[in-house]
Amino acid sequence: MEIVIADTPDAVAGIAADILAGYARKGATLGLATGSTPLKTYQELIRRHQAGELSFAHCHAYLLDEYVGLSREHEQSYYRTIRTELTDHIDIADENVHSPDGTTGNPMQAARDYDALIAASGGVDVQVLGIGTDGHIGFNEPGSSLSSRTRLKTLHPQTVTDNARFFGGDEDAVPFHVITQGLGTIMEAGHLLMIVTGAAKAEAVAAFVEGPVAAICPASILQFHQRATVIVDQDAAAQLQHSEYYRYALDHKPEGQDF
Ligand code: PGA
């Protein structure tokens, strides 16, 4: 993994946007995440697009996950959220923005169909990831199989608590079933781009970067990916034991070395 420690959340967003812009210019398939963390990155991509610097016209996008039981037009469905926060404001074709269908009577089949759709598309080139305070990526909660495929999952009570803020603070309004890309599915993306900001995530960052690879900390599977970039701000990096080395290694990166 390459660990990039940036000074501020704005700096994190700038670095992440630079990486994503490189893929957008190639008309790549983008793996998108919802949640609050990537918002600044998406705002920076929108800014560059509106300034005429960046086009997504040849891109396709696949979302990580979706709530089960919310209509697509529900403002907290991820189908709607990614449009509100990013794709309605750039020139990607709406029909090229894909997400698991949480509205069918058979979410298990919908999950399998989504996994197959991603594979048939040729796969995701770069996948944006956030991390939950419980170490989840997508909605792969603690205990998720490290080789899981896209499937139906039950949210951890911690995630329900964390996400209640999006539902007016009402935990009972948060759906407890979701469809999420599996850890095995996510690992097939060509490049994983994890973005983390804020002190609330410092423990989770230390656990997945420097702890053992274990299903109890699903994000730790990134240690097995050949190309994972982890961009954190100072607060999220606060519990890393080797932060000085990560800075040093970045400053002394050999020409042409990726990871
Ligand atoms: P957040 O969520 O970006 O809203 O903190 C991240 C996640 O739960 O994966």
Image (tube, rainbow, N blue to C red):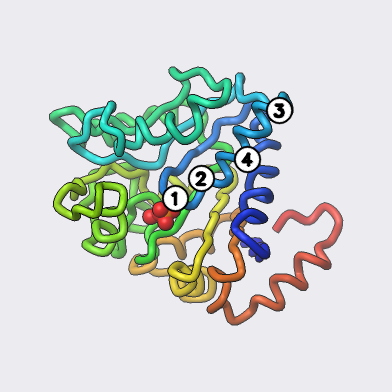
Judging by the rendered image, the residue that carries numbered circle 2 is 39
Residue at (30, 29) in percent of width and height: 113
Q: What is the crowding at mark 1: few (fewer than 14 residues within 10 Å), some, or many (at least 20)?
A: few
> Looking at the image, which residue sits at the far front?
168
Judging by the rendered image, the residue that carries numbered circle 3 is 51
Judging by the rendered image, the residue that carries numbered circle 4 is 44
Q: Is mark 2 within 8 Å of ligand 1?
A: no
Residue at (42, 37) in percent of width and height: 63
Can residue 75 be seen by looking at this rendering?
Answer: yes
Residue 87 placement, left or right of 98: right
Point out residue 52 in the picture as x, y percentages from the top left corner: 72, 24
The amino acid on which the numbered mark 3 sits, given as a three-letter code, is Ala
Instruction: Tell me which label, 2 or 4, sits earlier in the chain.
Output: 2
Instruction: Tell me which label, 4 or 1, sits earlier in the chain.
Output: 1
Residue at (49, 44) in percent of width and height: 188
Q: Is mark 1 within 8 Å of ligand 1?
A: yes
Q: Quadrant of ligand 1?
A: bottom left
Q: What element does badge 3 sit on?
A: loop
Q: CA distance from mark 2 to mark 3?
A: 18 Å
Point out residue 2 in the picture as x, y percentages from the top left corner: 65, 61
Q: CA distance from mark 4 to mark 1?
A: 14 Å
Instruction: Tell me which label, 3 or 1, sits earlier in the chain.
Output: 1
Q: What element does badge 1 sit on?
A: loop
**Residue 36, labelled with which disc?**
1
The amino acid on which the numbered mark 1 sits, given as a three-letter code, is Ser
70 up-or-down from 253: above or below: above
The amino acid on which the numbered mark 4 sits, given as a three-letter code, is Glu
Q: CA distance from mark 2 to mark 1?
A: 6 Å
4 up-or-down from 18: above or below: below
Q: How many marks?
A: 4
Q: What is the crowding at mark 4: few (fewer than 14 residues within 10 Å), some, or many (at least 20)?
A: many
Q: Is mark 3 within 8 Å of ligand 1?
A: no
